[in-house]
Image: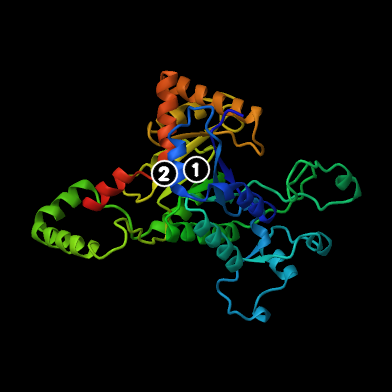
Amino acid sequence: MKARALTIMATRGEDQEIVRQFASRDVDKGSVIEELQGLGNEESPCRIVPSFGWHPWFSHQILNDLGYSQSKTERPDATSHYKSVLSLSPDDEFIHSLPEPRPLSALLSQIREYLQKFPCALVGEIGIDRSFRLPMHWDSSSEAARTASLTPGSRDGRPLTPHRVLVDHQRAILKAQLNLAGEMGRPVSVHGVAAHGILLETLKETWKGYEKESSSKRERKRRSTTSAVHQDEDNICQSNAHRPESRIVEPKPYPPRICLHSYSGPRNVLEQYLNPAIPATIFFSFSCLVNFSARTEKALEVVKAVPKNRILIESDLHSAGERMDQLLEDAVRSVCEIKAWPLVEGVTQLGENWRHFVFGDERLDQLIRAI
């Protein structure tokens, strides 16, 4: 394997612990960043950047208990829960094949614990998917055809049912995880299929009231309050002298950086994400499996429209190895071709963008704090 860093996404209950195990050797953020400076060195070890979250395909397995008291008697039972979050009223046989729903509060506690343990960890993969349908339950024939190498819980070739997870429930699970990412100051990887408008509106709800002022308004405000600003700066300097560390992350209800993974939305939605009033930094990731399998005009137009410092590439593959390496290389070459970048320049730019998304840009953070 040629890749020197892997950003591994958890999606459901069966793989949260697997991601934790892979990431256990890379707990110290400082050492990870130091080693990532030598990504081009094939002798350097591959490092793991873990990501913990609950994918919308499995959001029906989460019971939203945030509005309930600690008493379990007030929460709906499994049957009532699944009938309330799945479309087309599933029958009892199908419901009984589903796992016992997990409380959202317990999921958030687990993700918070993982984020505290792994300073580099992201939140993801999370999102909204209006097209996904639940697979049939396992029977004797599908059990016999299971792929041993796949993590339990995947579809693994099973036929699909007509049942979908209701969008309102998906939005609730997504928003709870976005809020946690904002609280912890972590970037997120977001999945959006057949839901580009709804996804954008859901994200907007998290940063409502935190929008940036336009430059003209900010300049007028700065000129009219110069003396107050200088007084604030003096107060900040005095208070920082008593702080154990100079960089304080203020919890917010929205993530600082958001990656729209394998982005398949239209250009007009992309342009809305680039609104300078949005306080989060939005990245757009592209993969060969989703975006470049067919060079459609839509895909070419979208990639061309993404600013050079907001574009990422990914394999979108469930396993690491030679195929993953090839998919990453093909994605890099595709982006460079579409953007008319020399290959070396493109590789350098994409590497910088990945570091910015995962670790943040300290220089940019300092500039924002100074304004």
Q: Amino acid at mark 2?
A: Ile
**Picture residue at 53% right of the left edge, 33% below the top:** 4
Q: Is residue 83 left or right of residue 194?
A: right
Q: Amino acid at mark 1?
A: Leu
Circle 1: element type: strand
Q: Secondary structure at mark 2?
A: strand
Residue 212, given in percent of the width and then of the height, sits at 29, 52
Measured from the top left, where is residue 147 in percent x and y?
80, 41
Q: How many marks?
A: 2
Which residue is pictured at 13% across the width and 52% down the height? 220
Give neighbour class at mark 1: few <14, some 14-19, many 20+ (Cα, 10 Å): many
Is residue 269 something that shows in the picture?
no
Identify the disc placed on residue 260. Answer: 1
Give the colour scheme of this rendering: rainbow
The residue indicated by pointer 2 is 282
Distance, label 1 to label 2, CA atoms, is 7 Å
Point 40% across, 51% down: residue: 256
Rendering coords of residue 341 (x, y %): 41, 20
Vertical order, 115 against 193 (above or below): below
